[in-house]
Amino acid sequence: MTDTFHVVAQRGLVDHDTSTSEPDCVRGLEVRPTTQEDGSVGWLLAHHSLDGREQAAG
């Protein structure tokens, strides 16, 4: 079983759908593989905000 983890902006202008493991978001997202403690690989889905605040955090 593959685990999927979502990262979303707090107090965003739109709600992000975190109920699915499919990489689908109105604003786009970054998909990264993550190795878990047991050696299995999961997925990190980092949802982008509509106001672009993640660009300033870099």
Image (cartoon, rainbow, N blue to C red):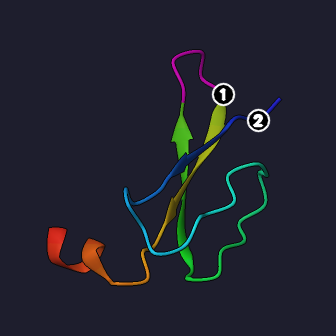
* Residue carrying label 1: 40
Range of residues picked out in magenta:
36-40
Q: Residue at x 39, y 60 (%)?
A: 9
Can see residue 46?
A: yes
Query: Which of the two residues, 51 or 6, is positioned nearer the viewer here?
Result: 51
Q: Are marks 2 and 1 in contact (CB under 8 Å)?
A: yes
- Secondary element at image label 1: loop
Q: Residue at x 71, y 66 (%)?
A: 23
Q: Where in the figure is residue 31, as x and y percent of width and height?
A: 56, 63
Give how far apart the Cα atoms at labels 2 and 1 are.
Answer: 8 Å
Query: Which of the two residues, 19 or 46, is positioned nearer the viewer here?
Result: 19
Q: Residue at x 16, y 77 (%)?
A: 56
Q: Residues within 10 Å of mark 2 (few under 14, many from 20)?
A: few
Q: Where in the figure is residue 53, as x and y percent of width and height?
A: 26, 76
Q: Residue at x 37, y 56 (%)?
A: 10
Q: Residues within 10 Å of mark 1 (few under 14, many from 20)?
A: few
The kind of residue tagged 1 is: Ser
User: Looking at the figure, which quarter contains the N terminus?
Assistant: top right
**Quarter of the rendering containing residue 15:** bottom right
* Residue carrying label 2: 2
Query: Which of the two residues, 29 or 11, is positioned nearer the viewer here?
Result: 11
Q: Where in the figure is residue 57, as x and y percent of width and height?
A: 17, 68
The kind of residue tagged 2 is: Thr
Q: Work out whether 21 lies above or below 13.
A: above
User: Looking at the figure, which quarter contains the C terminus?
Assistant: bottom left
Q: Would residue 52 be counted in the magenta stretch?
A: no
**Label whose residue precedes the other's in the sequence (2 or 1):** 2
Q: Where in the figure is residue 55, as x and y percent of width and height?
A: 24, 79
36 lies left or right of 12? right
Residue farthest right in this picture: 1
